């Protein structure tokens, strides 16, 4: 499975749960996560998508740390199962 397939599954799963998964493009701030997931009741998180077994690059890891230090949730997903786990966690808080 490639990253794009996981990304498409994420968009579909988020939509089924009443939300949207926006493509996050920050030209002047490289290394930001791929998607901003917005769910009902003001629940949101940043999502970095990777092909199975891949991990974020050093700059991406630095951005994730910064976002987490600001109190935001950041997920790195490299499988379809990771999507379900993330949604379950976000929707049950």
Image (cartoon, rainbow, N blue to C red):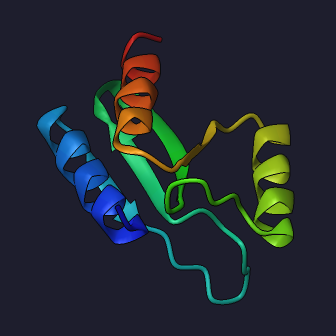
Residue at horizontal 76%, vertical 49%? 67
Compared with residue 49, is residue 37 higher up or lower down, i.e. above or below? above
Of 71 and 79, nearer the camera is: 79
User: Picture coordinates of residue 74 (x, y %)?
Assistant: 63, 43
- In the picture as drawn, the residue positioned furthest to the top comes out as 92
Say left or right for 22 vs 70.
left
Where's the N terminus, which quadrant?
bottom left
- Please give the count of numbered marks on the rendered protein: 0
Residue 31 x/y as whole percent? 72, 73
Quarter of the image holding residue 48?
bottom right
Residue at the image point whose x is 73% and y is 80% from the top = 29
Q: In the image, is 8 to the left or to the right of 70?
A: left
Say which residue appears at 17% left-offset and 36% top-offset. Answer: 18
x 63%, y 89%: residue: 27
Task: In the displayed orientation, state which residue is furthest to the bottom.
Answer: 27
Between 67 and 78, which is closer to the camera in this rendering? 78
Q: Where residue 53 sits: x, y (%)?
A: 60, 54
């Amino acid at each position: 499975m490639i990253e794009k397939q996981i990304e498409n599954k994420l968009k579909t799963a988020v939509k089924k749960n009443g939300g949207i998964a926006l493509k996050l493009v920050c030209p002047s701030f490289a290394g930001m996560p791929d998607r901003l997931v917005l769910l009902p009741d003001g629940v949101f998180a940043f999502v970095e998508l990777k092909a199975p077994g891949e991990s974020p690059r050093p700059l991406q890891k630095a951005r994730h740390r910064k976002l987490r230090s600001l109190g935001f949730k950041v997920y790195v997903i490299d499988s379809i199962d990771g999507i379900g786990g993330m949604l379950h966690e976000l929707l049950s808080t």
